[in-house]
Image (cartoon, grey):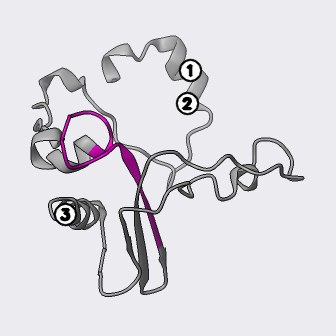
Amino acid sequence: PRSNLTQQLRKKYKSNERRGFCDAPKVEDHTSYPGPLTVDLQKLFPKIAALAGLRKDKRVPKGWISFSKHGDQCGLVICKGNAREPSKSKAPKGLAFEGENQHESVEEPLFRVSSGIDISGLHDLFCVVEGLLRTL
């Protein structure tokens, strides 16, 4: 915030200022801004909360959601139980390829949907998953 800007900091960063795209607005202290609206996602999506293990539900086991989108084609898998152990990879450590197929379920998934869904955001995804879990 601007209130923390000292003369020493002004001197240090003033020489690097450039007009154009890299300019940023000065922000006053954030304490005067209203806080964000608090939404309890566990109440909005109780079945997803049960899937994540945050709530108990007799019909929904613990598990996870796997979503993919390639072009206009969406794929959704709602899994339960344990994930497969990632196979030994020759890829360098720390890369995404090291855990290839790590989100595949050992057991048969609860739901596997590959057509007929149009998901354009996180809210759409949560609504579809919540609706599917309510059918259990």
User: What residue did someone put label 3 on?
Assistant: 127
User: In percent of the image, x 25 and y 27: which residue is there?
Assistant: 28
| Quadrant holding the N terminus | top left
Determine whether 119 is above or below 122 in the image: below
User: In percent of the image, x 62 and y 36: which residue is there?
Assistant: 16
What element does badge 2 sit on? Answer: helix
Question: Is 75 left, or right, of 37 in this rendering?
Answer: right
User: What residue did someone put label 1 on?
Assistant: 11
| Residue 128 spot, x, y in % from top left | 23, 67
What element does badge 3 sit on? Answer: helix
| Residue 136 spot, x, y in % from top left | 19, 60
Question: Is 20 left, or right, of 35 in this rendering?
Answer: right
User: What residue did someone put label 2 on?
Assistant: 14
| Residue 132 spot, x, y in % from top left | 22, 66
The nearer-to-camera label among 2 and 3 is 3
The magenta segment? 51-68
Q: Residues within 10 Å of mark 2 (few under 14, many from 20)?
A: few
Q: At label 1, which amino acid type do we have?
A: Lys
Q: Earlier in the sequence, mark 3 or mark 1?
A: 1
How many numbered markers are drawn?
Answer: 3
